[in-house]
Amino acid sequence: MIHALPRTAATEPATASPSSSDENIPRRYIAAAVLGNALEFYDFVTYAFFAVFIGRTFFPASSPSTSLLLSVAVFGVGFIARPLGGVIVGMYADRVGRRPAMLWTMWLITASTLGLALTPSYAAIGLAAPAAVVAFRLLQGFAIGGEIGPTTAFLLESAPVGRRGLFASFQLASQGAAAFVAGMFGIAMHAITTPEQMVSWGWRVPFLVGLLMVPVGLYLRRRLPETLRASRAKSGSRTGSELRLHRRIVVLSVFVVAGATVSTYVVNFMTSYAITTLKLSTGGALSATLASGLATCVFALLGGWLSDRYGRKRVMVWPRAVAALVTVPLFMLLVNWPSAAMLVLVGSMLAALTALSAAASFAAIPELLPAGVRATGLAIAYGLGVCLFGGSTQFVVAWLTDFMGSPMMPAWYVAATSLVTVAAMWALPDGNARSAK
């Protein structure tokens, strides 16, 4: 697939890059990187927010809980392709450049999102419908897995020394912004459609509207400078050998990602959880999406800024440790006093703690890797962490909640994985003093 890309000016390696000493990095650089990233995550998380309605469209079953389980299982299928996308696109970004890799992932996400939005229902074409959904979810996962490495590497390499944490945090902040926008569409569609219309066509609208921003993202990304210096580019064999030298960092990073991704997808799942388990209204449940997305955006930037001032490890460890301690009590409040306001409070607090910690991680992990394997190493760690833990989160908590008959299962799962993540974070070296260039 890599060799099929046209050898245009956009795909040729470039040697020019923003100077690390330049304090006036053009804002359009950040906008180009995070807009594309936000679009890709917007499409990916929109599926999670509309899982109930997608399940009824493509996976009709005798009970709503079975339909939801099938829907979130297919949501998890998208994560299977993330490590593969991370390896292939990451190596491409480390060989050819960050810019062409980011352009490639945008084309992939465009094709997969359009296909998903236009797939006919199970009632119309039978088993071909869920089969097509699985295929498009795999393509989405491949694109997202490939997006993380080059985008984060570009942001880090564009940043002045002393502001790398803040610049890298825009990666996570853009994901929060995507969740916020997806939540706004969810509330709007709920307000203007009936439940039957939502199942029939309403959930498709946010996907199609998101595609309108693709030309803007492509235009901006084509004009990015290349931050991978030609002397740092690696051949495929050299990438593999150098990654083996840093395998301890990559393995630890997988578990660093675990706590953040479990918390993130529990928060994303809370829309469906509130509707099916807590029996809240759809509008009230979707309001929590807005709040958690906004909290992620704001606290990610705060976490990146704090990590520049006080060090990566402190900002990674303490919010995640607090999350391990407070998630169960917060869910107890929600279960005993279920309401839209309490759902917003719990979701926002968990999202804020996750964003503070994860933002520092997005700077710490690539800082510990040399430039020639930075995109690949980060993408592998992120892809495996999200595949093994994030991809299964919604299915696991939905199944545990249904099997155990306890609405507290999501909280216990977050607490357990958070403790594992704290241990992995503590074992990572602090990379603030290392050069990220």
Image (spheres, rainbow, N blue to C red):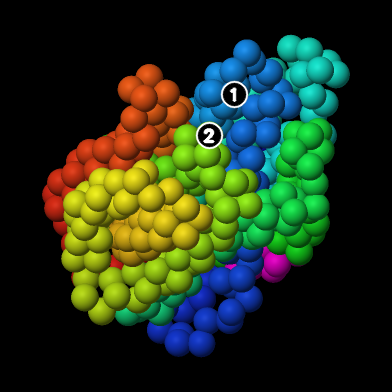
Circle 2 — which element? helix
Left or right of residue 402, residue 413 in this image: left
Amino acid type shown at disc 2: Thr
Magenta stretch contains residue 224: yes
Q: Residue at x 24, y 66 (%)?
A: 315
Q: Residue at x 77, y 19 (%)?
A: 122
Amino acid type shown at disc 1: Pro
Which of the two discs, 2 and 1, labels the residue nearer the N terminus?
Answer: 1
Q: Residue at x 61, y 71 (%)?
A: 31
List the single residue furthest toward the front. Answer: 337
Q: Position of residue 287 (x, y in %)?
A: 57, 57
Q: Which residues are magenta?
A: 219-225
Label 1, residues with CA under 10 Å away: few <14, some 14-19, many ≥20: some
**Which quarter of the rendering shows the N terminus?**
top right
Left or right of residue 130, residue 178 in this image: left
Residue bearing mark 1 = 64
Q: Which of 248/414 is in front?
A: 414
Label 2, residues with CA under 10 Å away: few <14, some 14-19, many ≥20: some
Residue bearing mark 2 = 276
